[in-house]
Image (cartoon, rainbow, N blue to C red):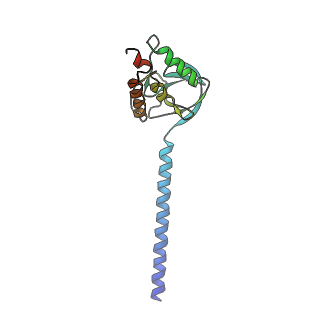
Amino acid sequence: MPIKKGLGRLKLIFTLFLVLIVLLVSILTVNKQTSTDNVTTEVAEVTGIIDGDTFFIKGSEKVRLICVDAPEFGDPGYWPARKFLEDKIKGQNVTLVKDFSERDNYDRLLRYVYLNETLINELLVLEGLAKYYPYGPDVSLCPKIREAENYAWENNLGIWNMGN
């Protein structure tokens, strides 16, 4: 009889061990899903372009590209940056990705913007139409945009070929 009792305890311990493993795997899986849920994305139609780094989406909401600074009206490079952004995204459905902050001091949405798989923030800087400009806590993709600026600068593209 003692052998059967020992096997019963062993089965109980083994069963409890399996239950514990299943619980741990479940907890880890839920935590992974939660961490990806922190990324806020939305798809929106671009209805107008203000300048090379700011545009309107449907509903008259303004969106500012994160880590990018395009020339302002009256500055050299303003029109090429604005036209580039207009040609690329006006009338298109883009994916807006929030980093840390929801809005800037001017009440504009702060977003990384994708057209299909292309990061528009990076493309604008890569073409030399805007500068890398990190600000605030919204910097998760800024290193990628900084690399784009290095490329544009090294190749004298856009604003890097205007004597600025």
Image vertical order of residue 28 relative to residue 113, above or below: below
Q: Residue furthest right?
A: 91
> Which residue is pictured at 51% across the width and 43% down the height?
37
> Which residue is pictured at 47% across the width and 51% down the height?
31
Q: Looking at the rendering, which quadrant does residue 66 occupy?
A: top left
Is residue 14 visible from the viewing direction of this image?
Answer: yes
Query: Which residue is more in the foreground, 22 or 126?
Result: 126
Expressed as whole percent of the image width and height from the top left, the position of residue 144 reads: 42, 34
Query: Which residue is more in the foreground, 163 or 5?
Result: 163
Quadrant where the C terminus is found in the figure: top left
Q: Looking at the rendering, which quadrant does residue 86 occupy?
A: top right
Expressed as whole percent of the image width and height from the top left, the position of residue 72 reads: 45, 15
Q: Residue furthest front?
A: 155
Expressed as whole percent of the image width and height from the top left, the position of residue 3 reads: 46, 86
Is residue 51 visible from the viewing direction of this image?
Answer: no
Indicate left or right for 6 with 117 as reference. Answer: left
Q: Residue furthest top?
A: 74
Count the labels in the image: 0
Expressed as whole percent of the image width and height from the top left, the position of residue 157 reads: 43, 21
Image vertical order of residue 116 relative to residue 104, above or below: below
> Which residue is pictured at 50% across the width and 14% down the height?
79
Indicate left or right for 161 with 112 as reference. Answer: left
